[in-house]
Image (cartoon, rainbow, N blue to C red):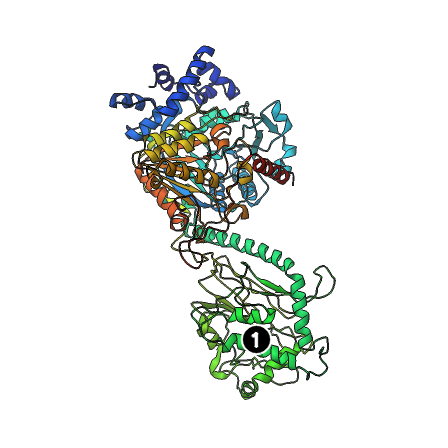
Amino acid sequence: MVNQRVVDLCHKEETVTSYLHKHPNKAPHKIPRKLFPKPNLFKRLFFRYEVKRELHHGQGELTEEMLDRVATCGKFQKRPSDLFLKMYADVLLCLERDPMSGLVSPPLLGSTGVIPLSIISVIPDIMQHYYDVIVRAEREVILATNYWQPSRSVTKIREALRQLSKNAGEKKRKVIVKLMYDRGALRQFVHNHTPVPAAGWKAVDLPEAAEIPNIQMEVINFHRPLLGTFHSKYLIVDRKVALLNSNNIQDRPNMEMMVHLEGPVVDSLFDMAMLSWNNALRPPLPSLLKQIGDASLPAPARRYLFGKKNPYIACKDIEGASRRARGDLRRQHTELLEELERERQQRMHNRGAELWDTVREAFHVNASPTDPTMAPRSRGADLWDSVREAFQQSPVTAEPSRGWNMRDTLLRRNPSEERMPSRGFTWSWSRDPTAAGPRRPATLHHVNMPTEPLVLNNLDAPMVDSPTEMRSRAHSLHENQRNATEKTPALEGSTAAVPHTQNGSPTSLSPSPEKLVPLRSDGAANIKTISDPGPARFATTEVLSNIPGGHVDAVMLHDSPDHATGENSALHVSVQNPHDSHLTSRANSFDSVLVRHTSLAKVAAHLNLGNNCEVDPTATELDGDFKPHILHKPHDPVPIAMVSRRPHGAPGHKDIRTPQNAAWLGAFRYAQRKVIIQTPTFNAAPVVAAALSACRRGVEVVLFLDLGFNDQGEMIPGQGGTNEQVVFKMYRILKEEGQTHEKNLKVYWYTGKDQIKPMNARVKQRNCHVKFCAVDDQVGIVGNGNQDTQSWFHSQEINIMVDSPAIVEEWLNGLDTNQNTLAFGLVDDDGIWRYRDGEKKGQPLEDLGGLKSGLFTSLREAIRMVQKARG
């Protein structure tokens, strides 16, 4: 039970912040020795054992009277729920041995506040809110992060600082900025909090002093060797608003979470920031000199604004941010596909060159027939007939396969053989990609083929960029269509005639009059002209009507003449289709064009010779909405407790007596129905044991984890193992006990909003970096800490524990909406993810990292991690 000494500590009037008001030049780390001294050595040894025992095994039954006493240990405006108070009682136990174990003055450990906004999205959305808050600063900004890496995120902060300086100059004032990160330096062995001089700012992409003349900035690089990582991520502006988030200031393809806090809890975070800063502040912060209002004004004097009434939110285009976030997801997806495509092109280059040489030889582009008895162009004619037959004369089936038939014909391979997943295929004009001279790469991308023959410009064969002989062969196959178009008049109202060749005859691509749809700049017929270098261009209505489930986004005819014949190039069509999320582009010849996509384009592909992609298992259409911003409903201040931990640099896994760990263990101990945790890693021994104990009590434990997140680091001896290893072991333990408790454990691999199956985090495409815990839909814990060995025992972590079923419900709804984990991520009761349906039903996921363990495996992964760090 919480002793009287802890109660007295929480009722003290003075705090580190109030002491700094009187002595603004004092180093914050020296103040706790005066205000909150530790017990003597013998008491600390006793409490070391006693507190650890009670955190692991509980304090026993807490009566109503005991809970009332606990409630007096926080500055709560109303009595919190019994669940919150039980967890808070365990947090207070940690103060018996060290009053500053929570990295905040004890009187500020329990507080109140409001949360008008949360963001669950990709990093750019959170960085935009950072920008919006920073540029509105009046006097001071405190920014802390773990990783600070030159990136688009850093660029956003740099732009915010420049704008802040400009705003301050217009108001003829100075703004104080304190920035802290962890980059590691030898000097930290002597002084953990190493100042970074202005001369070193440029190296980390910070603005130089001359760029921000109205800002006085101080930068500190903090790390406690060996293992005491500064893992905190927060922003405090004018002691009026605080942002607490999961992401670092870097670019990562992660889903992240941020909460916007206002009210007295901001003072608690400010007090924590002063202790984290450690050094004397030069210059002191204006709020310590009472130049701006104090966030801890009495409740009746404060009005909290929500939604568009809040100035930090009113500036936002919420719908636009949602669209940008969806675009960022697709952009990240597209970037990975492009990288995979480049790798595949390199692998397939030699094979493509040989195949292209065969095609060129068949059509006599640069060679004569190898068989002198063969009539000229007969091999080319046979090959063209095979292509044409693959596209049009195959029987119509439920599953379109013409693209595969055609490709198999060209590659002379068995259509039934197993194919590896691919993103595209390249035929290269030259063998050596590094050789000088022109090339004509043709990339074939995935497109869903229609179930009926796709006709373009009244030609029975598909339109294709090809050498002169192939084009000539196409003309001869469709002589009647070409003759018909010779008599085609220009469209009524059109000022340009149908394109002709240099000798005056119409091209084979000229459509018949009843099929013409003019391309106008006003976007008529859902078509717009991207480029119009020459005469009017036309597309056929047959193309528009035969696109399966899509609509035309752009049609373009580039007017560059063919280098061999002088003919106009072929028509290029970009199709918007709801079954893909990215637009790909190709360059098929010297006269090719590139059709680019916008971030909102869901799908696209160029109609081309064929299809060389497997059926992609990724769900490229976003199911339901994607809402990065959670605008919380107006609410009164709710109980909030700081549940953090200080950094611990020494090796070993003994430092469990911290408010963060106490809150997490209390979540499993006091839950009656359900504990939900989302974290990238889950392997700390205490949390694994606590989760198993909760399952045995009948509590449903739901874990949303990342598949393969930081596996190399987690396999180092002593780190706890990978997520897969831990999950497999947990299910095995519960099943071997034979009490069917495994049914209470539900583990999901994180599945991105645009995915239909989990994706291994090593591909760096769809990762989740959210740190969240919900207990019985009543209490929520959010912040910086992961559920891994590093966060449990070594890193500095900042978290808050919130007592509000309404806010917790809005958080849970936001998490469910912005990922497909609940729909597709559940593993089987042996810890293995398997396909639920389709041809692979019952098969394990291909991206599983394996369950191998042992000293040799751990050492191998440690070596790989070191090699990766060294580049």
* Location of residue 259 (image quadrant): top left
Q: 289 and 77: which one is in front?
A: 77
Q: Amino acid at mark 1?
A: Val
- 817 is higher (above) or lower (below) than 172: below
Point 55% across, 22% down: residue: 280
In the picture provided, is 567 more to the left or to the right than 306? right
Q: What kind of element bears circle 1?
A: helix
Q: 254 and 16: which one is in front?
A: 254
- 858 is higher (above) or lower (below) than 506: above
Residue that carries the numbered disc 1 in the rendered image:
387
- Residue 55's spot in the image, x, y percent? 38, 24
* Location of residue 75 (image quadrant): top left
* Location of residue 149 (image quadrant): top right
Quadrant (top left, top right, bottom left, bottom right) of the C terminus: top right
Quadrant (top left, top right, bottom left, bottom right) of the N terminus: top left
Point 46% across, 64% down: residue: 577
In the picture provided, is 708 more to the left or to the right than 71? right
In the picture provided, is 820 more to the left or to the right than 488? left
